[in-house]
Amino acid sequence: MPTDASNRAGRGAITVLGAGIVGTCCALALQREGFSVTLIDRDTPGAGTSSGNAGLIQTGTPMPMATPGMLRKVPAMLLDPKGSLVIRWRYLPRLLPWLWRFLRQSSARRTEANARAQMRLLDHVGDAYRELVRAAGAEDMLRHKGLLFVYRGAADARDAEWEMDMFRRHGVRVDAVGADELRQMEPALNRDYTHGFHLPDCFYTVDPKHLAERLAEAFEKMGGVFRKAEATGIEMGEAGPRALRTTSGTVPVERLVLAAGVFSKKFAQELGVSVPLESARGYHLMLLDETVRINGPVLDGKRHFAVTPMSGGLRLAGMVELASLDAAPNYERAEMMLPLAQDMLPALKGAKTRPWMGHRPMIPDSLPVIERSRRHANTYFAFGHGQLGLTLGAITGLLIADLACGREPRVDLTPYRSDRF
């Protein structure tokens, strides 16, 4: 177990590129181990994609995005603009190599293997967050309410049984919930919902951006340095990266952690690593000053969207599209969740809303890259977390700290190698 950095001999300098939740957790974990850490990002910590997730820390949902039957869904992804996952036609030619790899991951065998690899990380998520959140004094940012999946009728619930069975096979607690219990758990829920599943070990944050800020504040109080600058490239030396080129000058690098989310792809290429990483553009809609209250996150299992109670209102999330990094946001995808939520929670007004879009760094098998570079001993990779960036932030930070300290990682990192493709 790590000890207070003040009681440790200095371990040298390390630079973390990317101040989303993953990079911020890496910086804090390394700082606690006695490293002199510099955290670099063009935005303030947590202000980018990490600010816009559903707030769920999904310790019990080892479900890859590619699942059996995905090939049959591709036409709908192209033709139905209201689907939970869509592909922009203009982007399809460029996406085809990634999409082919993605569809290959949808066999029953690979889905099971990828879920098993996800669960290796998810098993450690609770303890990892408790460790880092306690160190930052940010326990008030988390709520332990579980995650409630809801369905309209027995047929929809039966369709979800294969997913729940997968969760159970991997050791996840799943409790079936009937209509009466649903009313007790969430009185505001539409009575058309008659079946559900509750995952009691999941938890969530009331403000993902503020959670990252609190972790970053603790990092800086311990002597860490945050530098707001946009990285434009890497200068290489004989032993690997020796500096980052940024819009505000060159930053010397002794060791480097690449944790820049979807933007990691171009930096990884500079380091000689090609990873099939694309943007799964996630949307959310904040319902501000909403009077309807729910007790915890609720996910419509058929329509694939979640409603999460947050400090600033209710957040609706779940719409994803595959398109280029520079394509303009289509905020209609965020707005289309409002009538769905009003159907779920009939008393919702939704008078004041704020849409958002961000780039989820998605790899075809839904697994991140977490490793020490096989080309450059002074470089570590921590990117490609897809829709589980918040969930896996803390455990990724602790794993990078294990590697940087020369310890055996607490999780076998073989499934997360960059050369697995």
Image: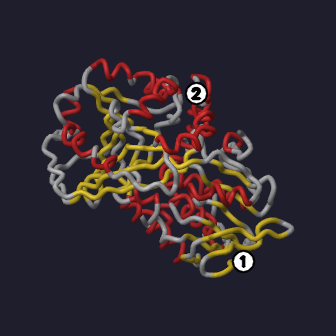
Where is residue 90? Give x, y as percent: 49, 44
The C terminus: image quadrant: top right
Q: Is residue 146 visible?
A: yes
User: Which residue ends up furthest to the right in the rendered image?
Assistant: 238
Where is residue 403? Give x, y as percent: 72, 56
User: Which residue ends up furthest to the bottom in the rendered image?
Assistant: 249
Q: Earlier in the sequence, mark 1 or mark 2?
A: 2
Q: Name the residue rendered at 54%, 55% in the picture.
A: 394
Residue 110: numbered disc: none
The N terminus: image quadrant: bottom right
Where is residue 356? Give x, y as percent: 36, 56
Which one is nearer the viewer's eye here, 317 or 81?
81
Residue 131 vs 151, above or below: the answer is below
**Which is closer to the viewer, label 1 or label 2?**
1
Residue 221 vs 400, above or below: the answer is below
Where is residue 376? Give x, y as percent: 80, 59
Residue that label 1 marks: 252
User: Tag 1, which secondary structure?
Assistant: strand
Q: Name the residue rendered at 61%, 59% in the picture.
A: 259
Which one is nearer the viewer's eye here, 80 or 289?
80
Please state which amino acid type lies under the numbered disc 2: Glu
Crowding near pointer 1: few (<14 within 10 Å), some, many (20+)?
Answer: some
- Residue 299 figure quarter: top left
Question: Which color scheme did the rendering employ for the protein?
Answer: secondary structure
Please state which amino acid type lies under the numbered disc 1: Pro
Which one is nearer the viewer's eye here, 9 or 35?
35
CA gap, disc 1 and disc 2: 43 Å
Residue 313 vs 213, above or below: the answer is above
Q: Name the residue rendered at 33%, 33% in the picture.
A: 303
Residue that label 2 marks: 112
Q: Name the residue rendered at 22%, 38% in the picture.
A: 344
User: Tag 2, which secondary structure?
Assistant: helix
